[in-house]
Amino acid sequence: MDLKQKLLLFEVAELEWRKLYLANPYDNFKPVSSWKEFVKQYENTMPAGMALVKEPPSDIRDRFFENEFFSSEKGLIPEPTNLDEQLIYPPHMNAEIVVFKHLRYLPIMMHTLQFVKISYVLEGNCQFFINNKTYYLKQGDLVIVPPDTKQAFFANGDNDIVVNVIMRRSTFQDSFAPLLMEQNDISEFFLQMLYRRRFSQVVLFNCSEDNNILDIILKLYGESQESIHGSRIIMNSYVLLLFGRLIRTYMDRAKTLIGEKSVDSVSNIIQYIRTNRSTVTLQSTADYFKLSEGYLSRYVKRETGYSFSALLRDLKMREAANLLRTSRLSVEEIIDRVGYSDISNFYRNFKKIYQMTPAEYRNSSN
């Protein structure tokens, strides 16, 4: 049985939701944020004599945090099914990327995620709810949702399969640093997502009939379920391939569902700091953008939440981490490359962010 066929199999929670749906379809229910709200609508419309279960078949809440998805030894499905147990309880501990199927027939439960989410309609159709609007997605549609965005998906057919790829914020800052240096709309999207306050732009790509995208998503799903050494590196590579495909083929056809593309210079400022991180100062940046130092300092703080010095330090540390993972440069060479003159200060800041020394970080990444 291939991965696509396995995704079509029903999990226990899906079967329970399906039973509730068929007894009293809730396509026209208003979006809710809790089981209690759903029960109220369901009981007002359910057939006479029907009894409703007291507890929801799967986890329902209005907010999910990173540690619940990435630091749990168990997966996202509470009960085993007819699939292999490893497909239901994948080894998420310390994962950077997790891939799982959206539960079919799950009611329209509005919730906020603390992490980055990519949702791909692998087969059939679904509805996407965001910002008091409903979008009807079809097979091949792919949506990128930034953290802290309230949203919900609703798939009400046996053949409606939506695959979710979720990633930590830090995964972009560390593992996908080269992507952030590119000059394109996707790189701009992620750069602003990481460093801009109140960023809420949601982007839709129509990738129908693109077997390359389908193949990448399926490989991501399959790799996510394995505990084989090297899976993390392979999954990061697949995600970069996915973004590369989107950049090459769909950049001009991307549709912004909510939020507007920024027309100010915060991303340009961040790119300038990244490019010149070894020598950049507040004064040199202000001079380059023809701004006063005071205005630039206040602007960066207002738009990113970082002071200029804190933003520079964060960018340097992220680049150092990237070099530790991807190069054979010595720690001393990396310190020089990212622009630190005080070695002890570098070690102190690195350990503060990563809770380990540079050498320990490099060893843990191999």
Image (cartoon, rainbow, N blue to C red):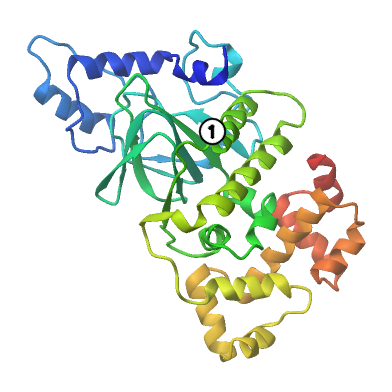
Q: Quadrant of residue 153?
A: top left
Compared to residue 27, the image places residue 133 above or below, namely: below
Compared to residue 280, the image places residue 242 above or below, namely: above
Whether residue 274 appears in this view of the structure is yes
Compared to residue 191, the image places residue 116 above or below, namely: above
Q: Judge left or right: residue 10 versus residue 167.
A: left
Amino acid type at circle 1 is Leu
Whether residue 357 appears in this view of the structure is no
Name the outermost residue toward the left.
48
Query: Label 1, on which residue?
Result: 214
Q: Between 169 and 67, which is closer to the camera in this rendering?
A: 169
Residue drawn 51% across the image and 29% down it: 100
Q: Around disc 1, counting alpha carbons within 10 Å, would you say few (fewer than 14), some (14 to 19), or many (20 or more)?
A: many
Which quarter of the figure is the N terminus placed in?
top right
Where's residue 325, x and y in %? 80, 48
Q: Between 105 and 127, which is closer to the camera in this rendering?
A: 127
Where's residue 232, x and y in %? 70, 35
